[in-house]
Structure formats: C-alpha cells, structure tokens
Amino acid sequence: MYRTKTNGELRAKDEGREVILAGWVDSRRDHGGVIFIDLRDRYGLTQVVFDPQSDSTSHKMAEQLRREDVISVKGVVRKRKKGMENPRMPTGEIEVYSSHLKILSKAQTPPIEIDDRIELNEDIRLKYRYLDLRRPRMQRNLLMRHRITKAVRDFFDKEGFLDIETPMLAKSTPEGARDYLVPSRVNPGKFYALPQSPQLFKQLLMISGFDRYMQIVRCFRDEDLRADRQPEFTQIDVEMSFIEESDIQELIERMIRHLWKEALGVELEIPFPKLTYQEAMDRFGSDKPDIRFGLELVDVTDLAKESGFEVFKQAAEIGRVKGINASGFGEMSRKDIDALIELAKVYRAKGMAWMKMADRLESSIVKFFEPSLQQRIIERMQAKKGDLLLFVADKDVGIVYAALGAIRLELSRKLPVPPKADDYKFVWVTDFPLLEYSEEEGRFVAMHHPFTSPKDEDIPLLDSEPLKARAKAYDITLNGIEIGGGSIRIHMPEVQAKMFNVLGISEEEAKQKFGYFIDALRFGTPPHGGIAFGLDRLAMLMAGESSIRDVIAFPKNKDAASLMDNCPSEVDDRQLKELHLKLDVAK
C-alpha cells in the first residue's frame, strides 16, 4: 500500500495514528541531523521528520532526496512542538515522524520551479505543462473547473434536462469563423468539419421532441487567438422548447446562483438587471457593460450643435457627441490626457476633447461655447469642481461608443478604489439588432447567427428596413465580460426563408448548406431557444485568472500550437496518400 492518507487531511486529532503518505518532495531541510521534508500531493502539504535516532536507514535515504522525487513514507502523527506550528498550512499543527521511507521515483532537476511565488514565462510553462500542472495554483484552478462542471450537470439534471451528445464530425457551414476541416479517407475529396457549435443539432433535438437539452461540449474555431480564445474550447450548451426569453433567463439566473454557491460559497441575488442593447451602448459605450462603477456616457449632441466648435457641430449634424464626467480626475496630467486621446484614436476616433472644471470650465476649446452654453454643459454633465469632462464626436456613432467605452474602462483602473474582481455584477443585455451591414461583403450579416428569430413586431421590417429589426437575442455579462449568449430561434419555415433571403443566401445555397435543417422545420417545430456559456471563460473569472489558458489542462498558445507535443506537426506521405491529399505549401 502506497498511502492511507493524503497530504492535506491530517490534523491534531490524528495524533498517535500510524499513517502511510505518498507524494512529491516539495522541499528538504537539514536541521542538525534531523531532516524535514514537505511532502506534496494535490491535496496539500505534510511535514515529515526523519530522525537518525529512531530510523537511521530512512534518515540516510532522506539525505539523498531532492525536490520532485516521489516517495512513500510510513510514520506516526504527532503534534509539532509549541511555537513550531505553521498557521499558513492546514496541516501546520502536526508532522509525521518517519519509521520507513520508500523512494518510488527519482527526479532530475526540473526545468521550471514548482512554486506559485515564482513568475514563469508562459512559453516555458506550456512546454513543460505536466510540471506546471503540479503547481498548487494550477491544481486549484482545475479543481474549480471540476466543481463548475459538476454543479452545472447537477443543476440541469434536477431541472429535467437530458445530457445528449452531438457529432464531432459534421458538415462544413462556413458562416462565422473558419472551420477546422477533416479529410475523409473513405470518401475521397470530401471533408468533415469540427463543429463551431452544436447549433443546428440542438435545434433538431427540439424538433425531435427532447424539450430540455444540455451538453458540456467541445467546439472548434479556426480564428486568431487572444487571452480568452482557444482553437478548441468548451461550451455549456442549453436548449429548451415551448419557452420565451424570460423563461430561459429565469432558469439561467437560478443556474448561476447555484453555481456560485456550490463552487465559490457565494450567495448571489437574483434577478439580474436587464439593459436593452441600445441602453447599454448609450450609457456604457459597450454591449457588455461593466456596471461596477459609474463614469457613464452623457449625450451632448444637441448642445454641440449650438457651439462654435466646428468639430462638434459637423459631427452633431448626422452623428453623435457624447462625453464622460471623469469625476475627481481634474488634476490629471496633460501626459495622461494625451494617452487617453491616443486610446480614442485606436478606436478610429479623430481625437478626444476635454474640459477641466475649476471655478469655471477651462480648456482650449471653451472659447467656442457661450457662457450660457457652458452652464448647460455643466448641468448636463453634473460637473463639479475637480472634475474632468471628456468628449468624443464623430459622424459614425459606433466610433463614439467604442472610443468612450474604452476610455471609460481605462479610467476605472485609475479610480481611487478600482472595481474588485469578486464584486460580481451580472447584467442581461437584450433586444440586439438582428442584422448589421458588412461593407467588406457588401451584404447584411446576422448579428448572432442566421437562425435567430426577429421580434414578432419587427418581421415586416425585413422587407423594408432590415437594419431596424431587433432580435430575440440576449447576452449575459459579468463585470464587463460576456459569459453567455443565446436567442429564441426561428421555428417557422417561411420566416427562416425570409431571413436567408435578407442575408443574400439563395434558395439553392440554403438547400446546399442547410437542406436537412430546412426540411426538418416543415414537420412541426415547437417554439424554442437556448443559450451557450463559455465554460473556459467562466472558470477563468471564477478562479480569478486573466487568461483561459490557466484553467485549461493542455491549452494551445497564441499561434494555436502546443509547445509540449509540437502540435500541429507534419504527417508522412503514407498518411497523405491514404487521405488522397497532396500538399502544395507556399514557401
């Protein structure tokens, strides 16, 4: 037997008990002949004492131990001497007095430190991921992920949902990100695609009569990566029949409350606040608003029209002029203000105007505003002495929103008390536009996906003013990060046909891409809808990390490569021949 207890469970009540422990040598200390070893496994640390007076053989072996050696130790639990306790360790009141040591495996000097206190280069961490995963922080993160998935499955099981798997090899439907393609050996020249999501399959399950479906499912998208993206990722996928938007939102709020209680021990209050898409953009400049702090956007377009400042006047004629009262930032240096101007330019704004509130407004542009107009700006912006007023103007309102939204987040980091990550503020964002126009493609594209239902009252707009049509779509955000999104789906064949037509998808193209689904809609389809959560992103936020790579056991790097096993890699000619493929790689 290698162990009878783990390294995290022994306490003072176990004094006198003979135990067998196993794990990795975390540290070794020689104190005048008596050797102390901190023995580590994923449950914690236990101090083991090797005393030559009681067990000279084990003591001699312990002299040769090095960090990361794997050992098994038999001994008796005893309380540490008074004043020698370690309150930072759950096992800090006790130690195990060794009577037998067995070395199970010797370790070479590891290329990385198994120590949370040491910052490591991410590429090195990913190359030696099996060692990085020994670190307590990473083990806590994966334990958190386990608790999340268990809590989610338990919740949906009690709610009557069926966990149903959908195919990993499916038909390519390149409507969003690029597909990962898989060549078929038995069907030469044809390809499967790895699913970007189970969207059509879960809708088919609704048509099949499985009115409550869930799945924790792997998805694949061939897109450029960043901290919260991976080529393969995991979704909590949910679909329900005979529901409206409020039904699924109420269910999901209860699921999140259950999840936070089970995984974090945190009690959340529901229901969560709701904002329409337009309200979120108008107030926060973002469709994923962070509501942990103020700094809301204020519309001054009407006042800008009355000014003599041409930049404002021209933008106000067909666009928008909005501002933020950066309350208390009146002493901000010109260097920091210039940095905000450069940030605005990143989001295609031509610049950012500003005024400081002292006894009166002060700025190089104040002269273009009559005193009465200045007073109205002060009242509109609720400005007081010591405030800094920031403005962005543009004919394209999207640029105004994006620039001020980014400035708002940058200011939040400079607040005297910045928003806390564990101040959990959830928001539903609803009533998204159904469509947006792609200049690049020269056509309308779906804001979410082609199967999202328009609001019933907006269906006629598809024939006349498509961009004014709103969707039965909803996102849920946490502290300014989207964690889930979904919609009520189109269940009427004629509405789906109309949607394809607006998107510029011909009847022939629709049949070629989605023929099986279009056919299925004709055989009695219930009203249905769903939502999908990014499990990786959810785990990242709940674990307090800033990258999803820290909550995935074996992630890819920013180049979609695995540094540990050198994936992707070349394959030999025999494999290519079996797949009827010939490479023509550009040099």
Image (cartoon, rainbow, N blue to C red):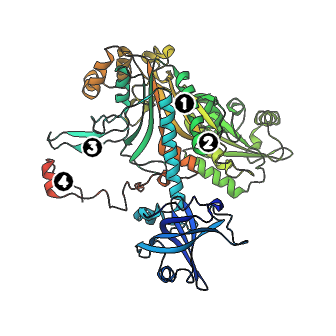
Q: How many marks?
A: 4
Label 1 packing within 10 angstroms: few (<14), some (14-19), many (20+): some
Label 3 packing within 10 angstroms: few (<14), some (14-19), many (20+): some
Asked whether, in this view, residue 418 is left or right of residue 103, the answer is right
Nearest-to-viewer mark from 1 and 4: 1
Nearest-to-viewer mark from 3 and 4: 3
Q: Position of residue 313 (x, y in %)?
A: 66, 34
- Residue denoted by label 2: 479
Q: Position of residue 158 (x, y in %)?
A: 50, 29
- Residue denoted by label 4: 583
> Please, what is the three-letter code of the amino acid marked with disc 2?
Asn
Alpha carbon separation for disc pair 2 and 4:
46 Å
Alpha carbon separation for disc pair 3 and 1:
33 Å
Quarter occupied by the N terminus: bottom left
Nearer to me, 392 or 139: 139
> Please, what is the three-letter code of the amino acid marked with disc 3?
Leu
Q: Secondary structure at mark 3?
A: strand
> Please, what is the three-letter code of the amino acid marked with disc 4?
Leu
Which badge, 1 or 4, comes first in the chain's sequence? 1
- Residue denoted by label 1: 252
Which badge, 3 or 1, comes first in the chain's sequence? 3
Alpha carbon separation for disc pair 1 and 4:
47 Å
